[in-house]
Image: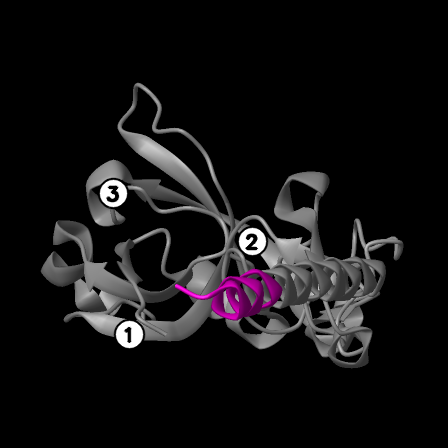
């Protein structure tokens, strides 16, 4: 190999090395610039359904890039503990500004506790899920249906797309307490069926 060829080879290696070094510097600069554009917004740690009141355990600060798109979400500096969820937010999703309200009156929802047989609700039911509520007649209601005009004689869908606010542990009596968010007109309907019907909770796929 000639001396000129060796020199050309060395020069090409030098140029390649310098090019890689410059590229690395530019990449580091871009990464640092992007890091400076990172902002923190609230994301959900749990399933959030309409009517749920946000607690500290429900949210986590999550870094995101591009603050232009982050403006549609809740900044992690915003105080949202105690706010009410307006529509469903899946666990791990960023919480949109439009997803919460400062007062439950805007939703006209009330937290209603229901005592349910352990066998009448899905296993692993948790806060934030959306359910349907059915009533099925008991032996008392079917044996004398005229004693109570509100008694049902067959399985009936009472309401659907109901948000679960809390679920207690099953106790020794074989019952569990499920707190659901109901609009005011439905509360009386549901409570009227507690005396002579069994309430069945069906997990929704909404």
Residue at the image point whose x is 23% and y is 69% from the top: 152
The reply to whether dot 2 and dot 3 touch (C-beta < 8 Å) is: no
Judging from the image, what secondary structure is the residue with disc 2 in?
A: strand
Side (left or right) of 117 relative to 127: left
Side (left or right) of 135 relative to 22: left
Pointer 2 or 3: first along the chain:
2
65 relative to 77, above or below: below
The residue tagged 2 is: 112
Region in magenta: 1-11
Hey, which residue is sitting farthest top in the picture? Answer: 172
For the C terminus, the quadrant is bottom left
Residue 157 circle label: 1
Residue 123 circle label: 3
The reply to whether dot 3 and dot 1 touch (C-beta < 8 Å) is: no
The reply to whether dot 2 and dot 1 touch (C-beta < 8 Å) is: no
Crowding at dot 3, Cα within 10 Å, few <14 / some 14-19 / many 20+, comes out as few
Pointer 2 or 1: first along the chain:
2
Q: Nearer the viewer, mark 2 or mark 3?
A: 3
Residue at the image point whose x is 32% and y is 33% from the top: 175
């Amino acid at each position: 190999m000639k001396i000129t060829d060796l020199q050309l080879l060395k020069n090409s290696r030098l140029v390649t090395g310098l090019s890689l070094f410059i590229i690395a510097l530019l990449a580091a600069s871009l990464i640092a610039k992007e890091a400076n554009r990172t902002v923190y917004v609230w994301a959900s740690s749990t399933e959030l359904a309409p009517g749920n009141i946000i607690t500290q355990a429900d949210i986590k600060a999550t870094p995101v890039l591009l603050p232009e798109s982050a403006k549609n979400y809740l900044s992690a500096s915003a105080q949202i503990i105690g706010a009410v969820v307006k529509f469903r937010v899946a666990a791990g999703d960023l919480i949109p500004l439009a997803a919460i309200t400062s007062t439950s009156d805007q939703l006209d929802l009330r937290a209603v506790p229901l005592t349910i047989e352990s066998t009448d609700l899905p296993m692993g039911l948790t806060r934030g899920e959306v359910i349907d509520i059915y009533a099925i007649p008991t032996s008392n209601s079917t044996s004398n249906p005229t004693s109570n005009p509100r008694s049902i004689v067959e399985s009936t869908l009472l309401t659907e797309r109901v948000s679960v606010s809390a679920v207690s542990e099953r106790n020794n009596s074989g019952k569990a307490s499920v707190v659901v968010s109901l609009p005011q007109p439905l509360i009386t309907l549901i409570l009227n069926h507690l005396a002579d019907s069994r309430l069945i909770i069906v997990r929704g796929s909404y």
